[in-house]
Amino acid sequence: MSEQPQTIQARAVPQLSFYERVGGHETFVRLVHEFYLGVADDEPLREMYPEEDLGPAEVRLRMFLEQYFGGPGTYSEQRGHPRLRMRHVPYEVTPTQRDRWLHHMFAAIATISDQMEPQDEEFMRTYMLNAAHSLVNALEP
């Protein structure tokens, strides 16, 4: 009796989102918390955050970044379309403030870089750089 060749069925390998690849919710909690630890002690940058307690800003940024990077859509569900530039219009974002923001964000990214592939870290840094540059809306005083 001769053996019939077996048919191998290919299974699609599910693609992980960026959010999932870098560790999901816990990674973004850690990233944003580390970022706000830096912001809390940066008086010139801190002036852009009207709340005494940075907690609400921390939650909003975490939800935004999770959604942007492929996680849950909680930000839009709770706050509507992100409209990043529009939400920052009330604040004078100068090149110096942008640079201070990037300093703290890049330091925060460094705290999670051990759990990311180099290309994922570069992707995140590039997004933050482009977003920060796009929000500058004022010259230096």
Image: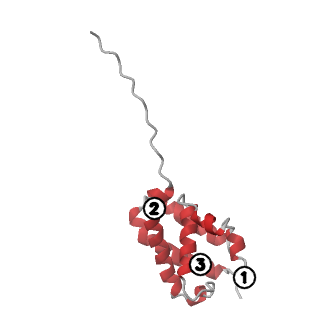
Looking at the picture, tell me which residue is in the foreground, 41 or 15: 15
Residue ID for mark 1? 139
The answer to whether 101 is drawn above or below residue 124 in the figure is below
Q: Quadrant of residue 63?
A: bottom right
Q: From this viewpoint, is residue 139 visible?
A: yes
The label nearer to you, 3 versus 2, is 2
Where residue 99 is drawn, which disc sits there?
A: 3
Element class at badge 3: helix
Q: CA distance from mark 3 to mark 2?
A: 27 Å
Residue ID for mark 2? 24
User: Horizontal and vertical percent for residue 68?
Assistant: 58, 62
Q: Amino acid at mark 2?
A: Gly
Looking at the picture, tell me which residue is in the foreground, 67 or 78: 78
What residue is shown at x 46% (from left), y 65% (from top)?
A: 25
Q: Farthest residue toward the left?
A: 1
Quarter of the picture holding the C terminus: bottom right
Q: Residues within 10 Å of mark 1 (few under 14, many from 20)?
A: few
Q: Residues within 10 Å of mark 2 (few under 14, many from 20)?
A: some
Q: Amino acid at mark 3?
A: Asp
Q: CA distance from mark 1 to mark 3?
A: 13 Å
Q: From this viewpoint, is residue 119 visible?
A: no
Quarter of the picture holding the N terminus: top left
Element class at badge 2: loop
User: Horizontal and vertical percent for residue 53?
Assistant: 54, 86
The reply to whether dot 1 and dot 3 touch (C-beta < 8 Å) is: no
Say which label, 2 or 1, has the lower sequence index: 2
Say which label, 3 or 2, has the lower sequence index: 2
What residue is shown at x 63% (from left), y 86% (from top)?
A: 50
Q: Amino acid at mark 1?
A: Leu
User: Horizontal and vertical percent for residue 73?
Assistant: 58, 61
User: Horizontal and vertical percent for residue 17?
Assistant: 50, 54
What residue is shown at x 58% (from left), y 67% (from top)?
A: 64
